[in-house]
Image (cartoon, coloured by chain):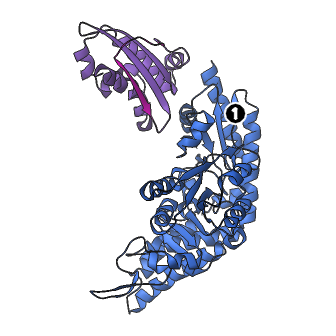
Amino acid sequence: MYRDEILDLYKNPRNEGELDTDHRAEGENPNCGDSTEIFVEIEEEEIRELKHRTDGCAISTAAISILTDEIQGMKVSEVRELDRDWMLDKLGIEVTPMRIKCALLGLETVQDALDR
Amino acid sequence: MEPEKIRQDFPIFQEREDLVYMDNAATSQKPRQVIERVKKFYGQENANIGRGMYDLANDANNAYRNARRKVAKFIGAKPSETVFVRNTTEAENLLARSLEIDGEIVLSRMAHHSEQLPWRRKAEEENLETSYIETEDGRISLEDAKRKITGETSLVAISHISNVFGAENPVEEIVEIAHENSAIVVLDAAQSVPHIPVDVKELEVDFMCFSGHKMLGPSGTGVLYGRKDLLEEMEPYQVGGGMIRKVTEQLVEHEKVPEKFEAGTPDVAGAVGLGAAVDYLGETGMKNIYQHDRDLAQKIVEGLQGIRGVNVLSPEHSNLVSFTAEFAHPHDIAEVLNQKNIAVRAGHHCAQPQMDELGVSGTTRASPYLYNTEEEGEKLIEAVKEVKEVFDK
């Protein structure tokens, strides 16, 4: 589970920071205490830029790093359609049932931010 | 005490030879003696209790009554003061529903949600004030207790040992302050009754709640101890069969305590199993268990403190070890430990306000019990060192 790539993304998260945008949402997994705030800049129905502030475990932090890289440039409508399988596939590791929530925290928060 | 020998009594350790089970604050494993006793009840004594006129029902009744007697004796109570419930949470909810109070409720910052939420709901519904005694180095602050418990206080609900820290709170002192202010004390003993000798008369608490499944008993078993005069004054929590003396169209007469609080068919087999668990603990000796759990926790603390970046939150003389690490999130630590077959808990331990106060999202918690060995403690320490190696790369 803790492949080098995941550990690297945990220790050096991609796209950390904040953006001045209305499309922002906070997400948390109260059970494990993971929390994130994601900022999305949308231009002409496309994801222009993403930033996040995350305080989480290796799985959630790595997933958010991958996610924020992957969806830059995607259409808003496409991002709304992304599901759990897509996220787990991008993460590329076997995630135990207890950790699926960690892996999905970022995606759910981004989709929430799009609706703001 | 010989944990290696004790382990032989627990079938799960034969089934899962490499398992290092250190999540005992959540629930304990069960010895053969308890499993066999439950099996014997279903195989040889099963009938509903209370009503049957036949021999089998009599056997079931006796088994249930004996179990209550054993559990009551184990905590220094009378059987009439010992109510069987499902778990600590249910005991707390029963109390919050049935106990009439009209003043302020004093809780503690470290409170487990189960000893906090029933009282918060009561306060909200009945417009009662609440306040929280602060935590000081993993224990309820006696200084703050003196400030918070006043003449306005009706009820003080605290835990004997916090499931976050594992240290014994100054219960006797708090009881004294509460009683000086004519307040009732409810003790959550879910983490103490399994680990240390507990006597309700010595502690002088008015109510005490604990779970059977954390002390080798079956899941679905718990106990509410209550001072008899208080239990007698209280309205029943649930009504129905088994808790009435007489019912007419005009009138309902309740059974005496404790039956008044046990509406419907109880978990008879569970209670019988809990009786066997209490026998097992009694034969092993609570003082021995107390010493063993603390010694092992202390060894784990010493080992962890030798790892740079680990911060142990449990104070001295705790019976469990709660810790955080700069190099990894609690869930990641637990996950790596799991890969080495070591079962520990990670998270907020049902005490979110306490986590907020500590400024952490959660901790990793290793909670040993009578069957855990020093060797297992060392395995745990080695595994945390490996977590550091993985994450510090």
Q: Colour of chain A?
A: purple
Residue at 52%, 79% in the rendered image: B232
Q: Label 1, on which residue?
A: B311
- Look at the numbered disc 1 and give the secondary structure of its residue: strand
Residue B67 visible somewhere in the drawing:
yes
Depth check, front residue: B1 or B365: B365
Q: Is residue B307 above or below residue B112?
A: above
In the figure, is residue B158 to the left or right of B258? right
Query: Which stretch did the figure color magenta?
Result: A16-30
Q: Position of residue B306 (x, y in %)?
A: 76, 32
Q: To which quarter of the image does residue B151 belong?
A: bottom right
Q: Main secondary structure of the magenta part?
A: loop
Q: Amino acid under label 1?
A: Asn
Q: Position of residue A25 (x, y in %)?
A: 38, 23
In the figure, is residue B44 to the left or right of B286? left
Q: Which chain is blue?
A: B
Q: To which quarter of the image does residue A50 belong?
A: top left
A19 falls in the magenta region: yes
